[in-house]
Amino acid sequence: MPAPTRRERKLIAKNRSARHEYFIEETFECGIELTGTEVKSLRERASQITDTFALVRDRECWLIGMHIHPYSNGGVWNRDPDRRRRLLLHRKQIDYLDGKLRTRGYALVPLELYFNEDGRVKLSLGLGRGKKLYDKREDMAKRDVQREIDRALKERSR
């Protein structure tokens, strides 16, 4: 009898501008403390994490600015869509991130929000250093050069 297959990761929201604005040095997977109607709403439709950031206060990690649309059948049980949400990380990870964030130039940026294989909501959190304008231009130039190389190779292979 074959083993039961696990479901795949289901992407809810992705922060496309994060890698453009920051050099992501490390990533962490963390859970989010949510209510039942928020989870049902995430299953129903997407949320928004583009203008979201995380910070460490009182030895706890908080996610600020994430918008989860109110659940359509929630009624009085719907919470504030823009409330602060606690991130679930290990104590050592929180202490490590707190030490890094005290260094100038570092920020905690959410990269992806998804359901893992077990159906739990997870957040991929990146520890990044802000890019300067010339860094962004350099990245765009590299991307353009790579695109031209790929086009040339594709034309050649035809």
Image (tube, helix red, strand yellow):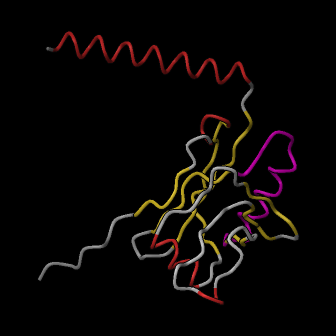
Task: Pick whichever, 76 or 57, lies toward us.
Answer: 76
Q: Work out which residue is located at the far left of the displayed protein and give it.
A: 1
Q: Quadrant of the C terminus?
A: top left
Left or right placement of residue 62 versus residue 68 in this view = right
Placement of 15 over or under 9, stated as above or below: above
- Coordinates of residue 69 in the picture (x, y in percent): 59, 69
**Where, by quadrant of the figure, is residue 68 drawn?**
bottom right
- Coordinates of residue 140 in the picture (x, y in percent): 56, 21
**Where, by quadrant of the figure, is residue 34 drawn?**
bottom right
The answer to if 32 sits in the magenta stretch is: no
Task: Pick whichever, 126 or 43, lies toward us.
Answer: 43
Q: Residue at x 64, y 42 (%)?
A: 25
The answer to if 102 sits in the magenta stretch is: yes
Q: Residue at x 52, y 75 (%)?
A: 41
- Coordinates of residue 81 in the picture (x, y in percent): 68, 71
Q: Residue at x 23, y 17 (%)?
A: 154
- Coordinates of residue 20 in the picture (x, y in percent): 61, 34
Q: Quadrant of the N terminus?
A: bottom left
Q: Residue at x 74, y 71 (%)?
A: 83
In magenta, the rendered stretch is 88-108
